[in-house]
Structure formats: structure tokens, C-alpha cells
Image (cartoon, helix red, strand yellow):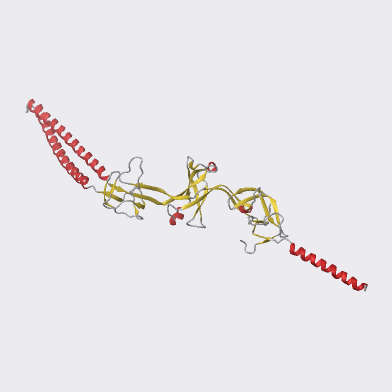
Amino acid sequence: MRSRRFRLAVTVLLSIAAIAALTAWLGREKPVDVIVKAVDVGAVQETVANTRAGTIEACRRAGISPSTGGQISTLPVTEGDIVEQGQLLMALWNQDIQAQHELAKSEIKAASANANQACVRAEVAQREAARLKKLREKNLSSEEAVDKADGEARALRAACDAALANAEVSQAKLNVIQAELERTRLTAPFTGIVAEVNGEVGEFVTPSPVGIPTPPAVDLMDISCLYVSAPIDEVDAPRIRVAMKANITLDALSGEVFDGTVRRIAPYVLEVEKQARTVDVEVDFICQQDCENMLPGYSADIEVILDERDKVLRIRTEAILEGNHVLVYTANDELEQRDITTGLKNWEWTQVVEGLSEGEEVVVSVEREGVEDGVAARRDPEGR
């Protein structure tokens, strides 16, 4: 009887212990899934980036129009054409000026012939006066004849000079008409590509009125040289210097990073909005061959490198919590908050000066619910 009671008591105690263990197991905290990245050694750059999207610009770009109004008579180029320096882009109707040009050339020929005739006569008269002067010395000619010959020679020399001056005036008139003729012709100031043409043969073009900008007749750009212009916040701009290295990225060429250098910093602050004051910074591509597949107008971003260090301890910047804390994934599958001291940083990497060792794992998915100090955790099997 006593033995039976003892066995019953033991059974009851074991049942209670099993229920308690089951309750504890069911009530235990479920580990949170986290993404972790190991602390490693590498390069870290301190950079500043543009606040709004920048734009690829051509080093040389000109919106050009004829300096005089008129009707388009010749338009030998279309959008996309590559033209050489000095090549004709557009010509206005100018037959009246061409007629004046031909007339002026004829007048030059006539004036030159007249000058030549007058100068030949002057030379003959000069020789005749010299001959009579020698005869006078031998009393073979009268003084009156000598004076008359000398006066005739000087008169003809003056006529020669006047004819030569008249020829110069005719040449000057031709130059004026040539200038007028050039004003009706639009030529390429440099080798480039025609980006836009505003006008058709037969249409009239007029110069832009003062203070009223109008579309250019031809938009010409040299795409063999490109750079990026991007706005930098006024707070960051004082730290930037010309010739600093920069990284360039483009939406059109996702995943590629191009090397560049700062070529210019605008000497003024641009106030687009009351709370958005920026400074335009221009960055050259170090290797212009990188620009072969690029077009002016592409959106681009820049990161100006203020400082750079190699072979330093680093972690992903996204792992850092407010106050320079990180969550370390410990060997017993728990998260441990750790204070760290940081150095250089950018949007991707942050240098660790103190608080972590190489190989330790820190949580980068800090925005997930339940991720905090002291909780049980496990590595996300999908790593997302």
C-alpha cells in the first residue's frame, strides 16, 4: 500500500515537472532573424555628395544664331550631324549682298587698272623731267621746259597716289560688303555635333531682342569633352577644393563608378528655395574615354572625396545606431549593444577606431522589429 502511494507521488511530481518544462519551452522568447556583416579591413573614404541630381554637360556648347534677320535659303545640317570648325550651318537669302560683292570686286579691278595707268604716266614724266634737267646743265634745254616737265611729273605722281588711294577705298568697300555677307552665313565655331536646329528653309529668323532670350537657330555642342555639374549643400561646400578626387555615378549606367576630379567651384550660393541653398560644383571625368557612351543631359551624382584611408577596420554604415552604438551578434546567439568610436565615414562604410575587432559580426538589419540589446537572434537564412 505504501509502495503504491510512493509510486503515485513520484508520477505526479514527474508530470508536474514535465508540464513546467513544456510551459517554459513554449513561453521562451522566439529569436529574431537578423542580417549580419563581419567587421573587416579595407579602405574608407570621407565624402560629400550632391543634394539634388546633377547633369552631364558638354565642355563647349553654343546656341548660335545669325547676327541679322532674314529668310533661310540654305540649311545643310540636321540634328545629330557632326560638323567641323568653320563648316556652314545655315545661310540667309543674300543675293542682293552678293551682287554688291561682285560689283565691289569689279570696282577694285577698275581702280587698280586706273592706278596702274596713272603710276606708269608718272614714271614716264619723272624720267622726262630728269632727262631735260641734264640737258639744261649742258645748255641744250630751256629752263622753262625743265620747270614744265618737273611740274608735270609731280602732278602725275600725285594722280598716281590718288589712284592708289582710290583702289584702297574700293578694297575697304569690298571688306565691308564681305562682312555684311558673312553676317548672313552661320558657321560652326568649333568641331561638334548639332544638337538642335530651329528653323526650316524658307522660314524667317530674327535676332533676339535685348533682354528677351529666344531659342538659338543651331545648338552646337562638343561631346568629346564632358563634365558633371551638381549642387552641393552650402554647409559642405567650404570643405571642397579644386583638383580633389571624386566618384561619379549615373542612373543611365547603373552599377558603374567613374573617377573624376573637381574642376570648378561656383563663387556664389544658389538660392533655389528658402531652405535649400547650394553651390554648383563641376567635376571632370579623369578618363574621357569613359564618356563615349554618354550624352549631355544625363542625370549624374558626385561624391567628392575629402579624405581617404586604406587598411583600416570598417563596418557598414547602416549598422550604426544613434549615439554610435552597434548590435553585435554573440557566440551564444544573442545581440549585445556595443559603444564604438568612429573615424572617417560615408554612406557605405565607416571606420572603427575602438570597440570592435576584425571578424566580429554586427547587425545591419537594425530597422527590423524586435532587434534590440539582449534579445535572442539567429542569422537570416535568406540574408535579406
Image location (x, y in percent) of residue 309: 60, 49
Exactly how many numbered labels are in the figure?
A: 0
Quarter-of-image position of residue 174: top left
Query: Which residue lies at the image location 20% right of the left edge and 39% below the top edge?
Result: 170
Image location (x, y in percent) of residue 360: 68, 56
Farthest-out residue, top? 143
Query: Which residue lies at the image location 36% right of the left edge and 52% below the top edge?
Result: 196
Image location (x, y in percent) of residue 215: 35, 47
Nearest the viewer among 342 and 11 is 11
Nearest the viewer among 339 and 179 is 339
Q: Give the side of residue 359 with respect to residue 97, left or right.
A: right
Q: Give the side of residue 329 with respect to residue 196, left or right.
A: right
256 versus 307 height, above or below: below
Q: Is residue 115 visible?
A: yes
> Which quadrant would the C terminus be assigned to in this image?
bottom right
227 versus 112 height, above or below: below
Q: Give the side of residue 21 with respect to residue 169, left or right.
A: right
Nearest the viewer among 91 and 212 is 212
Nearest the viewer among 212 and 117 is 212
Image location (x, y in percent) of residue 267: 47, 40
> Which quadrant would the N terminus be assigned to in this image?
bottom right
Q: Is residue 134 visible?
A: no
Q: Give the side of residue 186 with respect to residue 38, left or right.
A: left
Query: Which residue lies at the image location 22% right of the left edge and 45% below the top edge?
Result: 97
